[in-house]
Image (cartoon, rainbow, N blue to C red):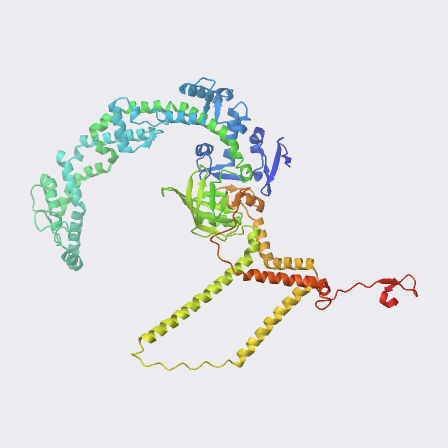
């Protein structure tokens, strides 16, 4: 029965239902949805959910996600609900979840509503429908795509398609090559206001820089040949400075000359390699031999690695300024650098090297087209309102269809607890080990998810799923909440069906073990005992086989080498049994016999007490063995919680959503035969069974029946007192004549 509650001060009466071990708010009307901002968020089941890895319309979620962080929060859900309710005349439409909207249902009493109604009419005209028609989600999405592919689509980005003549098309291409491009709403590359403004600013700066070089004679000391000379100087500037510095150091102390010319290590490196003018080790040595205050030779005695560069330097820079020379003094070098200093300073001020490749002529031509390109961008921006109206129309249609469903998977988990789902976080159904698991979630990283999901107290199986093509793959986690875990191991294969009906090959890659059911816990001790016995038997058999193989190998080796070695002496005869061993065996046998006698003594005593005592003893023995396992499983099953599983996937679960045993049976279905199915119990390939187990069980049952009948005296009666206990008769009570009013046994009265 639903609970009622009213929050003080808001006047709205809330109703709650209980599912999963906690109270959840009912959302039955539009009034409930509009009052969500007044509902204490401590009563919400979830406070946030991810946009990805949920079975919900991705476009709708992206429109609700106002800040674009990939998560839907309570405030964003409330804002979307209020906006949608304000855009329709009847807020109750939100509960219906219709896939289409008509013009007459839009609230045109507001400015935004009026604009949206006009956009809807225009959309209907574009679709060739009457004004009384309706726009579906698919229609709105198609209209948005058509508008996006138009040259002017309101995003402020223009492509080549926006230009009418080839000149402007080429200008747009050149700007993109120099500044890079941005994607238009259609997906094509284009340019926006920022790109255009930056380009033309750089173009103007570059043009001014070029004019400065043409108008200032100091920048070009050699006229048209200045650029070639400057290039030759720049290539040798550091090496020439290094040479004169080394010569100055040699003048300071002649002892440094051998080291300044290059030590033994440098020349050893050159000598060990194949020398050429391009040798890197050779290029590291000075331009010429270092001597105190020696001018730099220009035509001979030059480092072979720098001969060509020195020749260009002498012809293009030295000879035009200083005439023909055999060497260059340090003062002459300073004169050359002073003459070219304005050039190098001018080069450092060069703006935007990225547009230099266009050339000055092309840059001036583009500057003339600046206004035309800016006009195209403004024309595109003018369509922003039209596109925004279509986006609002699509948003309204989607919100009107999807918001209520999202609320029943966010504010409450009505969809999940309605006979097991499906909720939006359920990815599909996993079929494995004769079970179908409905609680399956997509995960990005199994190890990361497992570190948090392990706290859920649920048996979780992580599977890697692949399509038949082998290209598509994903990872899921499935909760096994019914059956047992005997055959669930890493590497087992199953089939996963997603919510769209697609089938995937699923392979177990990770398991988090927890109790699955009380039934499994009851049989766990017995299965553990059987596994332990099997393990010990296998271990003993393996050891015996190894020992036997070793003995056979030894015998074979002795036999093969019998003619090469002397026969080994016979082993000494085995020692007789030690008295201590015999005594120990006797004590063990006595203890075992005492235990057997005690056990059968208690069993006989219980049998004499009657069938009820026998049944109670059997139940007590079973509880003694299985009780601890059942209690532990019961405690863990009570703690089984959906919250950590969803939290690990990006949700923010605000409640302890329990998965109890009855609900677990709904989430995981075990294979059962259909009603009315016929079974043929004869298995032609069944193993031949030994009759001894049945004989032993029958003997035990006869033994128990004998004790029961003997206790009741039937055996003694049937054998005329020759076998069994006599049945004691109750004494007959008579009145004592000597003591009226008192009763005594018959034997005493007589």
Closer-to-camera residue (622/288): 622
Taking 533 as reference, is 379 left or right? left
Q: Quadrant of the C terminus?
A: bottom right
Q: Quadrant of residue 657?
A: top right
- Give the residue drawn at x 36%, y 71%: 553
Closer-to-camera residue (162/575): 575
- Judge whether residue 668 can be spotted in this image: yes
- Give the residue drawn at x 59%, y 61%: 697
- Give the residue drawn at x 48%, y 25%: 100
Closer-to-camera residue (111/613): 613
420 relative to 252, above or below: above
Closer-to-camera residue (606/721): 721
Residue 308 picture location, percent across and down: 11, 45
Residue 495 picture location, percent across and down: 44, 44
The mark total stands at 0
- Judge whether residue 154 can be spotted in this image: no
307 relative to 40, above or below: below
Q: Quadrant of residue 371?
A: top left
Taking 398 as reference, is 11 left or right? right
Residue 247 picture location, percent across and down: 15, 52
Residue 178 picture location, percent across and down: 26, 33
Q: Quadrant of residue 730?
A: bottom right
Q: Quadrant of the N terminus?
A: top right
């Amino acid at each position: 029965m639903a609970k009622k509650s009213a929050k003080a001060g808001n006047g709205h009466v809330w109703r709650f239902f209980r599912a999963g071990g906690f109270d959840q708010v009912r959302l039955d009307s539009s009034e409930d949805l509009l009052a969500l901002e007044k509902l204490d968020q401590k009563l919400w089941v979830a406070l946030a959910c991810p946009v990805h890895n949920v079975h919900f319309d991705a476009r709708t979620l992206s429109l609700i996600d106002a800040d674009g962080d990939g998560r839907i929060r309570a405030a964003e859900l409330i804002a979307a609900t209020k906006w949608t309710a304000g855009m329709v005349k009847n807020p109750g439409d939100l509960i219906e979840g219709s896939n289409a909207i008509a013009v007459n249902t839009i609230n045109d009493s507001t400015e935004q509503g009026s604009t949206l109604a006009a956009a809807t009419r225009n959309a209907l005209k574009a679709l060739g429908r009457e004004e009384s028609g309706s726009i579906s989600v698919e229609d709105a999405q198609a209209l948005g795509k058509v508008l996006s592919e138009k040259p002017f689509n309101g995003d402020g980005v223009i492509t080549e398609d926006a230009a009418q003549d080839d000149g402007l098309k080429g200008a747009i291409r050149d700007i993109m090559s120099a500044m890079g491009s941005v994607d238009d709403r259609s997906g094509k590359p284009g340019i926006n206001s920022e790109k255009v403004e930056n380009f033309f600013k750089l173009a103007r700066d570059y043009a001014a820089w070029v004019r400065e070089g043409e108008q200032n004679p100091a920048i070009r000391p050699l006229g048209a040949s200045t650029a070639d000379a400057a290039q030759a100087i720049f290539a040798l500037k550091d090496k020439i400075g290094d040479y004169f510095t080394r010569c100055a150091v040699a003048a300071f102390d002649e002892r440094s000359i051998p080291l300044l010319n290059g030590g033994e290590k440098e020349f050893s490196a050159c000598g060990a390699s194949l020398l050429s003018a391009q040798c890197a080790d050779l290029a590291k040595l000075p331009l010429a031999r270092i001597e105190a205050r020696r001018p730099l030779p220009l035509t001979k005695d030059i480092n072979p690695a720098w001969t060509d560069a020195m020749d260009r330097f002498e012809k293009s820079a030295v000879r035009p300024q200083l005439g023909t020379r055999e060497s260059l003094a340090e003062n002459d070098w300073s004169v050359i650098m002073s003459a070219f200093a304005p050039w190098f300073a001018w080069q450092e001020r060069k703006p935007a090297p990225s547009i230099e490749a266009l050339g000055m002529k092309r840059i001036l031509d583009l500057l003339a087209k600046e206004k035309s390109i800016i006009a195209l961008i403004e024309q595109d921006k003018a369509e922003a309102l039209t596109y925004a109206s279509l986006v609002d129309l699509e948003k309204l249609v989607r919100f009107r269809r999807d918001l209520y469903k999202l609320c029943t998977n966010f504010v409450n988990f009505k969809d999940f607890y309605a006979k097991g789902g499906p909720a939006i976080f359920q990815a599909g159904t996993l079929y494995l080990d004769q079970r179908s698991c409905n609680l399956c979630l997509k995960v990005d990283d199994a190890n990361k998810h497992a570190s948090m999901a392990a706290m859920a107290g649920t048996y979780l199986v992580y599977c890697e799923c692949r399509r038949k093509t082998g290209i598509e793959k994903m990872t899921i986690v499935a909760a096994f909440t019914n059956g047992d875990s005997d055959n669930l191991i890493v590497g087992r294969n199953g089939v996963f069906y997603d919510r769209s009906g697609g089938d995937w090959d699923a392979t177990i890659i990770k398991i988090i073990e927890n109790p699955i059911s009380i039934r499994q816990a009851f049989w766990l001790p017995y299965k553990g005992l059987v596994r332990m016995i099997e393990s010990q038997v296998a271990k003993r058999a393996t050891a015996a086989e190894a020992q036997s193989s070793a003995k056979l190998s030894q015998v074979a080796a002795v036999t093969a080498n019998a003619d090469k070695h002397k026969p080994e002496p016979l082993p000494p005869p085995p020692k007789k049994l030690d008295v201590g061993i015999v005594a120990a065996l006797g004590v063990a046998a006595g203890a075992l016999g005492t235990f057997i006698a005690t056990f059968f003594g208690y069993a006989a005593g219980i049998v004499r007490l009657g069938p009820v005592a026998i049944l109670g003893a059997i139940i007590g023995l079973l509880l003694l063995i299985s009780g601890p396992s059942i209690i532990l499983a019961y405690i863990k099953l009570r703690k089984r919680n959906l919250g950590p599983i969803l939290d690990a996937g990006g949700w923010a679960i605000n409640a302890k959503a329990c998965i109890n045993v009855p609900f677990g049976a709904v989430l995981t279905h075990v294979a059962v035969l259909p009603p009315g199915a016929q079974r043929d119990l004869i298995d032609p390939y069944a193993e031949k069974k030994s009759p001894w187990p049945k004989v032993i069980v029958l003997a035990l049952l006869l033994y128990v029946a004998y004790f029961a009948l003997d206790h009741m005296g039937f055996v003694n009666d049937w054998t005329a007192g020759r076998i069994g206990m006599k049945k004691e008769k109750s004494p007959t009570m008579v009145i004592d004549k000597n003591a009226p009013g008192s009763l005594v046994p018959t034997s005493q009265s007589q």
